[in-house]
Amino acid sequence: MKKISLILMILTSLIFCSNSFGQTEEVKIKTSAQCGMCKDRIEKTLSYERGIVSSTLDITTKEVTVIYKPKKTNPDKIRIAISKVGYKADDLKADSIAYKNLPACCKIPGDGKKSEHH
C-alpha cells in the first residue's frame, strides 16, 4: 500500500512539473492577410518558428491566433516573423521586399505602391 501511495505521489508530481514547464500563452495579431494563400503562408511560416505551438489565421477578421511557449518566444518575435513574410503584424510594417514578392491576390486592394506596403 505504501508503494502505491508513493507511486501516485511521484506521478502527481511529474504531471504538475511537466505542466508548469509546458505552459503556453495566446496572442492575437492583426495582419494584412487577404486570402487563403496568405493564410497558408503565415501559418506555415509560424509552424517553423521556435516556441510556437499552433497558429490559426481567420481570413474574415485578418487576425492570427498564436499559441506559444513564453520561455521560447514572445509576441514581438512572432510579429517580426509575420512581417518578414510580407504581411503587416499589428503596428509592425511588412518587410517591403517580401511584400513586393507576394502574389497579387495577397496584396492590399488599392495599394498604389505595392512595393512599399505599410
Image (cartoon, grey):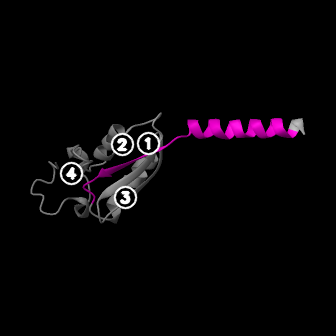
Q: Measure the C-alpha gap from mark 1 to mark 4.
A: 23 Å
The residue carrying pointer 2 sits among few (fewer than 14), some (14 to 19) or many (20 or more) residues within 10 Å by Cα, namely many
Q: Mark 3 sits on what residue?
A: 57
Three-letter code for the amino acid on which mark 3 is drawn? Leu
> Mark number for residue 78?
2
Instruction: Name the side, left or right, on which 24 lies relative to 85.
Output: right
> Mark number for residue 100?
4
Which stretch is magenta? Answer: 4-33
- Predominant SS of the magenta segment: helix
The residue carrying pointer 3 sits among few (fewer than 14), some (14 to 19) or many (20 or more) residues within 10 Å by Cα, namely many
> In this view, which residue lies farthest toward the left?
112
Instruction: Name the side, left or right, on which 23 lies relative to 83.
Output: right
Q: Residue at x 44, y 42 (%)?
A: 49
The one of 107 and 10 positioned closer to us in this rendering = 10
Q: Residue at x 88, y 35 (%)?
A: 2
> Which type of secondary structure does the marked residue at label 1 adopt?
loop
Q: Nearer the viewer, mark 2 or mark 1?
A: 2
> Which type of secondary structure does the marked residue at label 4 adopt?
helix
The reply to whether callout 3 and callout 1 are in contact (CB within 8 Å) is: no
The reply to whether callout 2 and callout 1 are in contact (CB within 8 Å) is: yes
Q: Mark 1 sits on what residue?
A: 49
Quadrant location of the N terminus?
top right
> Which type of secondary structure does the marked residue at label 3 adopt?
strand
